[in-house]
Amino acid sequence: MKASIEQQIQADARYGGLSARELESYWMPFSGNRQFKDDPRLIVGAEGCYFRSADGRNILDTLSGLWCASFGHGRTEIADAIAQAARQLDYAPPFQYGHPMAFQLAARIRDLTPNGLDHVFFTNSGSESADTALKMARAYWRMRGQPEKTRLIGRIRGYHGVNVGGTSLGGIVANRTHFGSLVEADHLSATLLPENRFSRGLPEYGAHLADQLEELVGLHDASNIAAVIVEPMSGSAGVIVPPKGYLKRLQEICNKHDILLIFDEVLTGFGRIGAGFGATLFDVTPDIMTLAKNLTNGAVPMGAVVVSGEVYNAFMEGGGPEYVPEFPHGYTYSGHPLACAAGLAAMDVFEHDRMAQRAAEMAPYFEEQIHGLRGLKHVVDIRNLGMAAAIQLEAAPGEPTRRPWDVARACWDRGMYVRQAGDTLQIGPPFIIEREQIDTMCNLLADVIPSVR
Ligand SMILES: Cc1ncc(COP(=O)(O)O)c(C=O)c1O
């Protein structure tokens, strides 16, 4: 007699004992749900640079989860801190009340981020950080008596998460088309230029692209523009590294016209590009910085928005009676005790284990090995900065995202998790990765990339 689907699923270790009903119940994010449910890739454990799959294999994690567990999986210091917090204080309301760890973590972040970024607002994700920052920028100008400064400017291929503001200011086409126009926004050009193909680190050419901001100022007048939001290095669109001088120029134009500069450092924050932050590496301190990934090393959802004294004080001075919220915005889980406990422990790891330095030290070897993939069939560009890299593949005719997907799928079968997005493979391993693991990763990619159709 033919086995039922249920029996087939339960006999297959890849399904980790799930029933068909359980599989169908979960609508997975940013996933091909139909494909996954036929061909599951379930993860049941993680330690160091490896995942453990439901069918019992160790899988090399080449993206620190989603760029967020960069200090390595399974940090016991963080797990212990979360467990302790859960026993002592499961929850405290963040509106008009507080708990000490939120203040301690805010001060810690203030100490780590560049001078001038002095006040920290907590969120639960990068998307919430981006939307919070955009609302802050609009409200800031109202507080300053310039309510007409409302226009927001993003960048083509930028990624600021998936909430309404972030989707609108972002510029990855596939993330926008389903939703129609949301918040009105302008976009600067992407800094991805054919002249810069296979650049190692910062490309030489393209700083002039920042001057497009002058054109937008000409078009709208600065009196109508609230803020510009950019990632110092775009991660999700495939590691688009800013040309030398670009960010400085952008800041000069913002300063000249009294436009707030927001750095979305959700991905670059806490060491990814071989420095604490993009702001540190590029010596450009924005007015507002968003953070999320690495803040708890991925262990508990958490994001943060760090602002200058000038931004914070505008709210404090213009906020009306002292008992009234100066910024009517916040989340039930802003500064959740478990997230703060994880954040404090993760910041200990970040500092004591010198994670940004570790990333900077490993980066040259990583760069050398990744660029060794140049010349492989399908590879049309390789970009890198710090411990981030993207390998861009030529689109298969009529199926622009197919090849990276096929590579990622084949790598999983051979014991490696690789993130594909659009026409790129994106590589951002935990900073604790060793040279031999980088070799393993690049050897497998060298084998698999040319083998796909
Ligand atoms: C720069 C940037 N902003 C925002 C986000 C969104 O973060 P989340 O997925 O935590 O909402 C991401 C996520 O990749 C990101 O890279």
Image: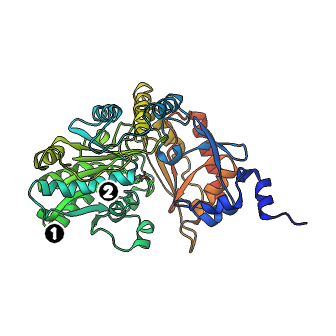
Q: Residue 17: x percent and y percent?
A: 73, 51
Q: Nearer the viewer, residue 339 or 243?
A: 339
Q: Is residue 433 left or right of residue 347?
A: right
Q: Residue 111: x percent and y percent?
A: 28, 31
- Image quadrant holding the N terminus, namely bottom right
The answer to whether residue 324 is seen in the rendering is yes
Q: Residue 94: x percent and y percent?
A: 32, 43
What residue is disc 1 on?
220
Q: Residue 180: x percent and y percent?
A: 38, 74
> Of callouts 1 and 2, which one flags the residue occurring earlier in the amino acid sequence?
2
**Residue at 56 percent of width and 75 percent of height:** 398
Q: Secondary structure at mark 2?
A: helix
Q: Amino acid at mark 1?
A: His
Relative vertical location of residue 261 with respect to residue 347 in this rendering, above or below: below
The answer to whether residue 452 is seen in the rendering is no
**Crowd band around label 1 with a 10 angstrom C-alpha radius: few (<14), some (14–19), many (20+):** few
Q: Nearer the viewer, residue 286 or 334?
A: 334
Q: Amino acid at mark 2?
A: Asp
Q: Nearer the viewer, residue 8 or 62?
A: 8
Residue 157 quadrant? bottom left
**Residue at 73 percent of width and 47 percent of height:** 55
**Residue at 80 percent of width and 54 percent of height:** 11
What residue is disc 2 on?
131
**How far apart are labels 1 and 2 at the CA level?**
22 Å
User: Which of pointers 1 and 2 indicates the residue nearer the eye?
Assistant: 2
